[in-house]
Image: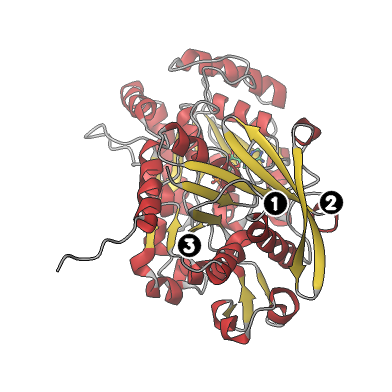
Amino acid sequence: MKKILFAASECTPFVKTGGLADVIGSLPQALQSEDLCEVRVVLPLYDEISSEWTEQMEKTADFQVQVGWRSQEASLYELNHEGVTYYFIGNDYYYTRKGIYGYYDDGERFVFFSRAVIEALQHIDYEPDVLHGHDWQTGLAVAFAKIFHPGNLKTVFTIHNIKYQGLMPHHAFNDLIQLPLEHFGGFEWNGMINCMKSGIFHADKITTVSPSYAEEIKDPFYGESLHPLLRERDADLSGVINGINAEDYNPMKDPNIPVNYSHSRVKKKENKEALQEELGLHVNRDIPVYIAISRLVEQKGFHLLERILDEFLQQEVQVIILGTGEYEFEESFKHLAWKHQGKMATLLKFDEGTARKLYASADFFLMPSKFEPCGLSQLIALRYKTVPIVRETGGLKDTVQPFNEITGEGNGFSFTNYNAHDLLSVMNYSLSIYHQPDLWNKLIKNVNKSQFSWKESAKAYAGIYSGLTETETAPEE
Ligand code: ADP
């Protein structure tokens, strides 16, 4: 069986800021449960990781990692969780901090991590066939694997979001990376050291998290300046849609929600009433509830929502927003909630339990993203029988089919152009469907049937790994 080592910067249930953590926390299990390959995962040991996990870890090695002229200490810990072995790399200087990103030296923190991943290969009882790096934080690990282990360690690099690239001034090549000058071109882009570029440049295969996004990032609008490189590497680039852990996100068993349910809209409405009560909204199970659960950043389409919510809220509807992020959005959604007391709530926090209560209570899930590599929230919403309303981009386009009242097909609502009034009109249309029981029931039937498991995608990844590691047979004379 092929041996794969994932390197990533976050992973449920240990540490999470977004969908990347969900993927790293569920794809290895999916690959293993289908007996497709063995997967282990290496992560930084952040201070954020709770004692519930650190107490279970076993220290297995101490070693030195060269970061430019400095020699940094690394400690290696091991933990087995639900059949997967996780390695954690600790260093007090880089990771004993609040939160996991957002520091002036984030670039250096992940140069260290990337070097440490390669160094750790000598200290673990596991010889991977493939190193699979995820996002810019591990782009350099992929580069180092290619440079230090040419030939015998294959590499895959997955782009989860091309907007975040890990940029550093070009002198970081000398200060932190310290390789012979001939390698400079593999790390530099537009005068900066670019970790995302380094991963894309050096990887044997590149994947991203939906077929549509794999196409979009070759275009200047979505490519965040890396589109020329992606076009060059087109033959090695593919899109594999993410799944979710349907056992973990399971409304039938989720302990965070007051009433568990499978298909019952009545029980879902009981959750709605409990939530309305808790948040000080008018308690009425028949009022449609629209939610957004997200990082409050431009990518997620909040400029559009900000523009039209006041008008939308003139109707008999409720809106709940859960998230943290840019000041502008936090302030304007707080203001709107104040203005529409009883109809709108804004919860400025990152809280898994609250998120699940919202998924379980709402009728509609808003995700009008400007771009969306895959998006897991719309899949979680579908799993909790909440109808997604999305913009047709990236993974949203690949997972949500717009409802067609003539044919009765479709599991959500969508609009094409990044335009606030297009969003408003599709939200108004969703409201009209909600009030027509025949059509609403058809839509809900489709929502109930939606698929979001890892099964097919895990097979696609396994195919990529075996394509890389199969020994080439010489053609017969
Ligand atoms: P991204 O990775 O771009 O943030 P995704 O839709 O892929 O977006 O994944 C977001 C994940 O983070 C989902 O699991 C979602 O439920 C969760 N999430 C986002 N914001 C919050 C929040 N404020 N509280 C709890 N969970 C959140």
Counting residues from the start of the chain, the first of labels 2 and 1 encountered is 2
Q: Nearer the viewer, mark 1 or mark 3?
A: 3
Residue 433 placement: quadrant: top left
Residue 235: quadrant of the picture: bottom left
Could you tell me which quadrant the N terminus lies in?
top left
Front residue of this view, candidates 424 and 157? 157
Amino acid type of disc 2?
Thr
Q: Identify the colour scheme used.
A: secondary structure
| SS for dot 2 | loop
In x, y percent, where is residue 369? 50, 52
**Disc 1 target residue:** 325
Image height check: is 393 above or below 235?
above
Distance CA(mark 3)–CA(mark 2): 34 Å
Three-letter residue code for mark 1: Gly
SS for callout 3: loop
Residue, disc 2: 96
Q: Are marks 2 and 1 in contact (CB under 8 Å)?
A: no
Give the x, y percent position of residue 221: 46, 69
> Is the C terminus in the top left, top right, bottom left or bottom right quadrant?
bottom left
Distance CA(mark 2)–CA(mark 1): 23 Å
C-alpha distance separating marks 1 and 3:
42 Å
The answer to whether 21 is drawn above or below residue 382 in the figure is below
Q: Earlier in the sequence, mark 1 or mark 3?
A: 3
Q: Left of 403 or right of it: where is 26?
A: right
In the drawing, what numbered circle is on residue 152?
3
Q: Nearer the viewer, residue 251 or 362?
A: 251
